[in-house]
Each structure stands twice: as structure tokens, then as C-alpha cells.
Image (spheres, rainbow, N blue to C red):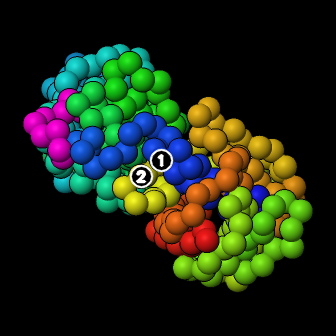
Amino acid sequence: MKKLFVLFLIVALLPFTTGCGIFGDNDDAAGLAAMGGAVDFSVQSELAGTISDAASLRASTVSYTMAEIRAMTITVGDMVMSFGELISSSPIKIKFVTKVSSVKLQELVERNEPVAMTIKNSNGEEVKKFEVVLPQEIVTAGENAAPEITISSTGVIEIKVTPTSTAKPVASVETTGGVTITELSAPTIQWQAGMGGTPAAFTNGMNINFSHPVFLITLNNGSSVLNLTNLSCNFSLKVTKANSETVAEYAKAVAAGAEYNEPNQKFTLMVSDDPTTGVLVAEMQSDLTAGTYTVSIPQIVFTAQNGNVFRLKGLTYSFKIQ
């Protein structure tokens, strides 16, 4: 647990030691809003079912006509995207496209909370629904931004920020069919100077007299600690100092004692050696410079093998390195 929280902080703090974000220059002038104009935006999604000349009469079979496929839309936040093309008929893979103002897109990203994405049919009925955290990289990409979102048949969401960038998993959860999400209660947070230190309580806005903090987050489901055994998870984290920001996303299987190192992230993410304790560990890989830092966790989603979904979202903490 200690290690996990430390990892989160590392992700956020590291870019500030160099005066810039992990993903490049984060100065406000490089943002989408400053760029103005419109940005290409596309979403590709796989749907269960088949395509036929006439809709199936059997309730057990999901079947669409091409007219129904072309009439589908997807709403991202309050932005409606129309059918662009049928990429594949078996399985059904649809591409939705639109032009979105850079200001609107930046607003969606900077909201720092899960954005609802809903695919609807011609009758306005829900076909598939997700909540996804859009990465800060979309903003820092500036005039090169052209987000391409891909939703797999299993619900995993990946985003390419620019046409030439590598697809990257983001924190998301499918809510189709009234999926029940157990919202986790506030976690217990501790810190230590290093992995060999004695954990102490972390308080919002506290001063820390060392530059290499390690944070431990204990996830709680009500009065019980969440057992992370056999849970898959994805994370989204944002840490801010002055005008610098960074986001990190994960789509990794939880394993006791395992470390997850993301290229160029300069931090370590891990689950404690005993996953039954529900502890995430976030550890910085380099010292932080003096200053005040804000750590935001828009969403952490855990899915058990039996399909139960647990989520922690909306956490914001700050601390000061003296």
C-alpha cells in the first residue's frame, strides 16, 4: 500500500524536477485553447452482434441493419459524434468522427474527472456506455493533437493522442447494462522518507522535509480493506506544480510485489507484497525540488474475476517540499 501511493506521487512529481512535464512542454501557451481552431477526433468501437439485411426477430441475437449502423452516434461528454465508417462487419467495428473546437476538448481534459462516452442507436437507446479519463497529453500535444480512441470488445480503451503516437491504455470502466460500481470510501494514506522508513500519517497540505517521498494508499470498501488479489486495474493520476502537469495511465494486472515501470514516466508503481492489505505504493525515482505539489487521482478502477467493479475517484491532495 505504501509503495503504491508513493508511485502515484512519483509520477506526478518527477516532471517538475526538470522544469517540464513528462510528456513535454506544459506551459499554458502550448495548450489547445491557445492554439484555437478545430481538432480531428475519432472513436472506434467493437459491438457485439451481427449485420444483416433485416433486423433479427430473435431476442437472443443482436442484429443490426446497415441503416441502423449508420444512424448510430456516440456522445463524449456533451459532444455528439456521428458515424464515420464501418471498419469491420465481423466483428462489428464502427468509427465515429467529428471536428471539435480545441477549447471544448481542453475543457473535457482539464475537467479532471471521468468523461461519459455513450453509443446510441437511431432511437436514442443506449447500446454501450463507458466512463474514461482523457489524458493530459491531448492538451500538451497542441496543434498536433488528433485524438483516436479505440474501445475493444472487452471494454479496454486506448488512446492515440496524435496520428503517429503509440496507443496507450487509459483509466476507464464500462457501465453498459446497469453495471454496478462499488465506490470505495476515502483511503488511508501514509508517507515515509524511503522504503526503509517508518510510515506516518499523511495530512492534506502537510510539509515534508525530504525530497524523495514514498506514499502508501490503503484502499477501503466501507470499513474493510479492499483485497487486491485477482483484480485487474487501471489508473489515472495527475500531479501539478505551478503550470506543469502530467498524467499517467495504467492497464495492468495486479500482482503482489510486482513493479510496473512505464517508459519515460520516471516513477515506480506497485502493489504491496501482500495484496490482501489493499495497499498501493507510489515511489519517486528522483528527488523533487522545493515547492508545493497537488496530486489528483481522477479514477482508479479495479475489476474482480467475478466481474465486480470497484472504483476510487475524485481524490486531491497537496503537500509542500521544504
Q: Which amino acid type corresponds to the residue marked 2 in the rendered image?
A: Ser
Residue 104, percent from left and from top: 18, 49
Dot 1, crowdedness within 10 Å: few (<14), some or many (≥20)?
some
Q: Quadrant of residue 26?
A: top left
What segment is highlighted magenta in the picture?
33-47
Q: Does 235 appear above or below 23?
A: below
Disc number placed over residue 244 in the picture, else none: 2
Badge 1 marks a residue whose secondary structure is loop
Within the magenta stretch, is there residue 241? Answer: no
**CB under 8 Å between callouts 1 and 2?**
yes
Residue located 48% across and 55% down the image: 238
Residue located 50% across and 33% down the image: 168
272 left or right of 136 in image = right
Q: In which quarter of the image is residue 279?
A: bottom right
The residue singled out by tag 1 in the image is 19
Q: Does 14 appear above or below 68?
A: below
Q: Which amino acid type corresponds to the residue marked 1 in the rendered image?
A: Gly
Q: Can residue 154 be seen in this view?
A: yes
* Total number of numbered discs in the rendering: 2
Disc number placed over residue 282 in the picture, else none: none
Dot 2, crowdedness within 10 Å: few (<14), some or many (≥20)?
many
Between discs 1 and 2, the one toward the N terminus: 1
User: Split into 4 quadrants, where in the image is the C terminus?
Assistant: bottom right
Q: Is residue 251 visible?
A: no
